[in-house]
Amino acid sequence: MIHPVAAFDRIGEENAFAVLARATELANQGRDIINLGIGQPDFKTPDHIVEAAVKALRDGHHGYTPANGLLQTREAVCRRTLSMTGMEVSPDSIMIMPGGKPTMYAAIRMLGEPSVDILYPDPGFPIYRSMIEHVGANPVPVPMREENGFAFSAQETLALITPQTRLLILNSPANPTGGVTPKAEIDKLVAGLADHPQVVIMSDEIYDVMTYDGEEHTSLLTYPEIRNRLIVLNGWSKTWAMTGWRMGWSIWPDSLIGYVRKLAVNCWSCVNAPSQFAGIAAIDGPQDAVTDMLAAFDRRRRLVTDLLNELPGVSCIVPKGAFYAFPNISDTGWKAKKLASALLEETGVALIGGPDFGVLGEGYIRVSCANSDENIENAIARVGDFLAESRV
């Protein structure tokens, strides 16, 4: 039997895709499935973006593009970055990526090796830990605590840094919790990082527009003192409902941009041209669809939270960002993954168990707000009936 090198035994999964596959299988069997598991907007990509890609194809943009992306696409990212953060960046510092995950992989591959510590949020996006373990580095979880609104604590984060720490991964607004870290806490973290000049920061800001209740996203780009060791991850997937287009971007320090460009040449060559023209249209075109989507997510997160808090043994704080709720189900007596599996198989409601997002996710499940009000109400009613009738 052929077996790959040991590093491939250390690659984990993103279980949301496994749940999606099982939910699809059940739906194909005729089951009535409501999916509150997958992390993608339930809106179509706006028409003007689609038409930009079609036009690019018709205009003959069928060939390779530069490994770091078309200049005009990178310039569009510069304009968007300036409008969102007030910070000017050079197109030479930008990589156009086939989604957000390649930036995670590139940063962790570039900085991680045995004997190196990499800090990452827990609960957090599962690919962080998966890739850290794959490269043989030591994963160090940074707790995202419910009592802290699922924001990181600067004091707690800084206390975890050692001379072996090479990379710190941050994510706000956050998946899976909907937590938003306040600017004051980020100020404290950045000030403390002055004592740890060896630490590179990767800030995952893919949900940057998705904040509510007066909360504001604070980009790490607004701290010039760490710019020379900062990687910012962002992209088109969430803001413009373009998950399947596989379009992301990242902003790199001068010392690392050449390495990630060479990694792209070796791994994926380039991002396809039509999608890049669509990305330009997304940034420069009308934002009405984005505004409407955010209004829907704002309404739904409150609906989800209100309904969850009526269920026996469930409590849920109101998420301040992204489009997820992360209810505490500890008092139901169920383990999170077992409950999520039972709900899918017995009620047709797809959710993701908290341990799929880290060791500190036990006692929680992730609920996506990316579905209609009617489906959300129906799904949570099914959950409530199940909890009222079931025994662990």
Image (cartoon, rainbow, N blue to C red):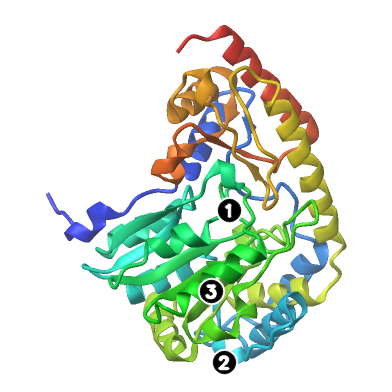
Instruction: Kindly identify the amino acid type of the residue bearing the numbered disc 1.
Output: Ala
* Above-or-below relation of 324 to 92: above
Q: Is residue 82 left or right of residue 299?
A: left
Query: Which comes sooner in the sequence, label 3 or label 1?
Result: 1
Where disc 3 sits, the SS reads helix
Specify the label residue 92 is tagged with.
2
Q: Is residue 194 left or right of residue 172?
A: left
Are the residues at dot 3 and dot 2 in contact (C-beta closer than 8 Å)? Answer: no
Who is closer to the viewer here, 75 or 303? 303
Residue shown at 44% from the left, 48% from the top: 14
Instruction: Kindly identify the amino acid type of the residue bearing the numbered disc 3.
Output: Val
Specify the label residue 122 is tagged with.
none
The mark closer to the camera, 2 or 1, is 1
Res. 117 image quadrant: bottom left
Could you classify mark 1 by the number of other residues whose Cα lies within 10 Å: few (under 14), some (14-19), or many (20 or more)? many
Residue shown at 64% from the left, 44% from the top: 324
Q: Is residue 190 left or right of residue 8?
A: right
Residue bearing the label numbered 3: 190
